[in-house]
Image (cartoon, rainbow, N blue to C red):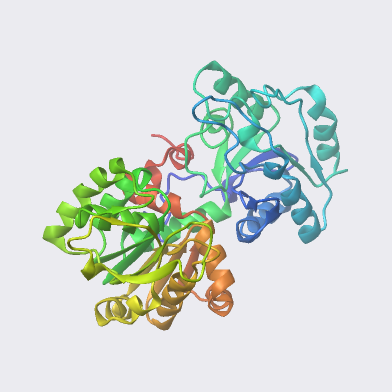
Amino acid sequence: MEKSGLDPRLRIIQQADMKDKIVLVRVDHNVVKKGRIKDPYRIDATFGTLHAITEKGGKPILLTHVGRPRDNKTGKIECRQEESVRLVVEYIEQKLQINIHAQDFPIDPENGIMHMDESIKPALDHLKQGKIGMIYLPNSRWFYGEQITGPERDIFARELAEIADIYVNDAFGSYRTHASTYDVARHLPSFAGLLLQKEIKNLRRVLYPERPFVAVIAGAKYNTKIGPLKALYGKVDHLILGGLMYNTFVSAKYDIRIAGVSEQDRTLAMELVELDKKEKKILEIPYLVESDTLEGKIEGRYRTIKVSDFIGKKELKYILDIDPKSLEKPEVKDVIGSAKTIFANAVMGLIPHFFEGSRALYRLIAENKSAIKLFGGGDTLQELKNLCPETYMSGLDDNDTYYFTGGGSVLAAIEKGGPYHMKPIEALLELE
């Protein structure tokens, strides 16, 4: 490992000759929700790479995924306009003051974009001639070959390779092994962008933390986080869970049914419950907010409940937040206050109505002035910015605070034993 914190086998854009070459850049600009950009941080974070490419004489073509247009059960791809890249293109044009060509292709109503056809050739010519500053391709998940297996996937990867001379991966948040994050790298000279390099360097602060190391993890799904949670559990001194993940853990631990927690997840959570009986790393959050409904914070239909009162109960309504007074308890407050490294990938309540727990958590973390503070995930950053804007802004200029563009990517890297075992990054290594 070099002093830079990067594996010397990693091919980086600083090494690439890009003069007059078309550069396909896979970014993670998945920031469009319900027809608007809620937080442009993940777009802004890639500007350094885009500037570096143009300074080296490269001509960039950008590609990102937005949302989940593919139905995993039926395989149908629905190309909804609210999941197009249009808003991203408009934002970049405004910020960088450049002319971007947003490419369109024919869309099949069942299968999305089957192939990149000849219609892109005029735009490629204009890019080479400098008549436009950039091309932005459609949502990568609108392409039929992006997420499937088989020959159509290889065809799509080759079609991407045919329009470019160089491939740059700057999409740390897009860690899944898809055609545009992995397969295309086998067909072109491929390099890590500046943002990806920065994310890998900061991952070392999670993988080899200053101790005590405290992680706060919350999410809407438990079954997809089992592997990463177990791997993270082995690294932390203390673990705080929130959201449905904590509900599932508590449901299994106290043998109590909680609305929204499946029997399957309860069973899966027992492994972590048994593990924690020995290690006792998971901090119990003593006060939770129970609601009769998911429809909002309706007066008279929500209440604070104590975990210590769970014994003997059989069933609870929806648990939609932690009560902020939980974080005032010494057993919780002192752990966060004495930590030397804090990793938070957590929205503790059901936003937008149940936000008090998240705000109290972010404020408590901010009070620890000596810790390295690492935040991960678009939802976490969005709520940190919304609920504690001063804390968010000060973190942007603090060397001991870092905002990862992908929280799931950090957990995946922990589970796999480091970033270089993640397939998209592995594809950028010089093999001996």
Indicate the position of residue 418 as horizontal and vertical percent values: 35, 49
Indicate the position of residue 338 as horizontal and vertical percent values: 29, 80
Quadrant of the rendering where the C terminus is positioned: top left
Left or right: residue 326 versus residue 363 is left
Q: Is residue 146 visible?
A: yes
> Residue 323's quadrant in the figure?
bottom left
Task: Identify which residue, 70 or 86, lies in the foreground.
Answer: 70
Left or right: residue 206 versus residue 399 is left
Task: Identify which residue, 339 or 75, lies in the foreground.
Answer: 75
Q: Answer above or below: position of 301 versus 162.
A: below
Left or right: residue 12 versus residue 84 is left
Count of marks overlaid on the render: 0
- Among all residues in the image, which is located at the extreme front? 300
Q: Is residue 4 visible?
A: no
Task: Identify which residue, 86 or 235, lies in the foreground.
Answer: 86
Q: Residue at x 52, y 33 (%)?
A: 178
Task: Identify which residue, 206 or 149, lies in the foreground.
Answer: 149
Q: Residue at x 43, y 68 (%)?
A: 302
- Among all residues in the image, which is located at the extreme top? 151
Indicate the position of residue 428 as horizontal and vertical percent values: 49, 40
- Among all residues in the image, which is located at the extreme left? 278
Quadrant of the rendering where the N terminus is positioned: bottom left
Indicate the position of residue 257 as horizontal and vertical percent values: 28, 52
